[in-house]
Image (cartoon, rainbow, N blue to C red):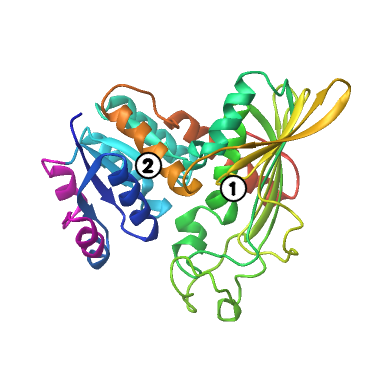
Amino acid sequence: MIEIGLGIVGCGGIASVHADAARRSGFRVVACWDSQPQRAAALASKVGATASKSLESLLAHPDVNAVAVAVPTDAHASCAQAVLAADKHLLLEKPMALTVAECDTICAAADKSRGRLQMGLVCRSSPTSQHVARLVHAGTMGPLDFIQARGVRRRGIPGLGGWFTTRSRSGGGCMIDVGVHLMDLALHLAGWPRVLRVSACAASRFGSPIAQYRSAEMWGGPPKVDGTFDVEDAAIALLRCEGGLSIEIDVAWATNIPEGVARDGLLLRGARAGIHFEIFGSEVRSVVERDGELRDEVAAVPSPFGWDAAWDAQYRCFGELVHGRGAAAATAREGRELQRILAAFYESAALGRETEVR
């Protein structure tokens, strides 16, 4: 198999995760670029790559066949278009962009490019997610009525005061950051029914004033006290889908909830069975009716550390896409559809009422 040369655009915290998974999956990281040159130099030194002076020089590198874009959300559209215009294959981090209109520009660029695009929606690649997908697609659960998806941190606001918590750069808070993964996975498992309406509630309580925030988990470094926090740090959404399925998403960067009272993961309730699983866990719990009785069952899903396994599976799929032997694990059209739903979420939260997905 011909080795794939990967360029990494955006060298913040998640870039090392991309680099490690790519190398485990048969890629060679050959070039890195970031708007902050010292970050590109640090990652390049770690992985034995070149620190490019510009995005253009990275794209001109003769050994770069594919590019992972992991920049702040407000730069997704411009970087993605540049990669695709250079006919390079693209792994684009979630969310796709700031707006549906920006998603449209990316989709148009992908349609013209010889490069192929895969969205970075890694949760659907975890061993437990793939196990449940096989059960659902085999008809084990029967028609789905409800999906509940939860991802709640008691204190875990990322990059407080920086781009993560600045709406004009990120597009929103915990829903567009963490909730988009839950939304994608729920819809993926359900076969992508059309979402008709969204009812949303959002809170912004713990990130401001920034100087008073305390947490042992400081993803993105210590808070920037003079920075911005104008996004939600907790949210709940109800998605009403065509065909009757309802999806509830409960997500928080920070909230007061007693330890252990509400498990993270997805709960799928169907006509024949119910299933709960943690996305990066090692088991799937189910309840089924057998001989007139409800029986609880636990299926082990043997794998290495679920997080690494999910990232490796995502990159293996991307590799097959680059070699022309497979489809994208998550498509541009799916990324755009998520953006439409997110837009309806933020509109509903602002208006205080249910809104249609347009």
User: Which secondary structure lies at badge 2?
Assistant: strand
Q: Quadrant of residue 206?
A: bottom right
Q: Quadrant of the C terminus?
A: top right
Q: Quadrant of the N terminus?
A: top left
Tag 2 residue:
92
Which residue is more in the foreground, 252 or 106? Answer: 252
| Left or right of 304 on screen, residue 156 | right
Which of pointers 1 and 2 lies earlier in the amino acid sequence?
A: 2
Which residue is more in the foreground, 168 or 294? Answer: 294
Q: Which mark is residue 179?
A: 1
| Left or right of 139 on screen, residue 36 | left
Q: Quadrant of residue 229?
A: bottom right
Other-residue count near label 2 (Cα within 10 Å), few / some / many at <14 / 14–19 / ≥20? many
Q: Is residue 36 above or below residue 202?
A: below
Region of the chain picked out in magenta, as a range: 41-63
Q: Is residue 59 magenta?
A: yes
Residue 347's spot in the image, x, y percent? 64, 46
